[in-house]
Each structure stands twice: as C-alpha cells, then as structure tokens.
Image (cartoon, rainbow, N blue to C red):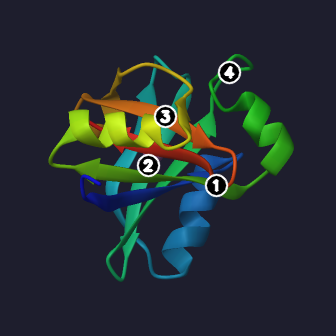
Amino acid sequence: MASLKVHHIGYLVKKIDKAIASFTGLGYQITQHTLRDDIRKVDICFLEKDGYRIELVSPVSEDSVVTGLMKKYKNSPYHICYETEDYESAYEELTANGFIAIDTLTPAPALQNKEVVFLTNASMGMIELIK
Ligand code: NI
C-alpha cells in the first residue's frame, strides 16, 4: 500500500463562526481563516492543536455538497483526509480494496487548489485523498 499520511480531520459545523469560537476556546489555533469554496458551496476554516489539523466545513447553500450530511450528522467529524507521495498508486490500491470514489478529482480552494477526491468504504465511511 502506498503510504498515507493524515492531513486533517473534516468536521461538519452548522455555524462556522460559533464553531471557531468553541474550538479556539479549547486551545485550537486558526491556521487558515474562513474561505468560501464556491465549487462545493461551503465555508472552510483550518485549525490546529497538538499536531492535529481540523477542517471545519459549513454549508452556505441548500445545494452544498454537505447539506444532506449535515441533516444526518449535525455538528460532527465526518471524514479523515490523507496525503500521499504516490497518488496514482494510492488511488488504484484503495479502489481495488473496497473504496468507491464518490466524486472525481476536483480542485480544493482551501488547499491551495490542490485536487482532492472523496472515497467511501462500507465498513469505514468517507475518506478524502489529496493528489
Ligand atoms: Ni477535508
């Protein structure tokens, strides 16, 4: 398996400003201020604590990519994102091992426009992979 390194934990939040206040209250530092992702129709903010990077994701429109998830999960972590030095191998191995891509490589404005893909696995839920 191509080695995967955890990049961040994606966290759904209904109100991003209130969530940021709560996270910073626990000692998280903002590493990237809130930025609008017009492709996914979400606001995104990155925070960090003790080496853990958290991505807050909040829908800004009824047709955002997370509107359905938000109804199901409320405020909750919902994906772990991985980076790898060998994207092609990692993607091939994941899809050969029960992971199904739920979208295609799409630029992520909150990650300096690096391309990312989301995959899901029946026993594990959703992951994100950075190219
Ligand atoms: Ni993410």
Q: Earlier in the sequence, mark 1 or mark 4?
A: 4
Q: Secondary structure at mark 2?
A: strand
Residue 34: x, y in percent? 43, 43
The disc, 4 or 2, on the residue closer to the chain's N-terminal end is 2
- Residue 110 in view: no
Where is residue 94 shown, x and y percent of the image? 42, 42
Cα distance between the residues tagged 4 and 2: 17 Å
The C terminus lies in quadrant: top left
Q: Secondary structure at mark 3?
A: strand
The image quadrant that residue 41 belongs to is top right
Residue name at image x 61 percent, y 70 percent: 22
Q: Please tell me which residue lies in front, 7 or 2.
A: 2
**Disc 4 target residue:** 61
Which mark's residue is nearer the viewer, 3 or 2?
Answer: 3
Q: Along the polypeptide, which appears first: circle 3 or circle 4? A: 4
Instruction: Using the image, determine if residue 23 lies above or below residue 31.
Output: below
Instruction: Give the side of residue 68 with respect to residue 24, left or right.
Output: right
Residue at left offset 66%, top offset 50%: 13
48 relative to 20, above or below:
below
Q: Which mark is residue 118?
A: 3
- Amino acid type, residue under disc 2 in the picture: Cys
**Separation (CA) of disc 1 from disc 4:** 27 Å
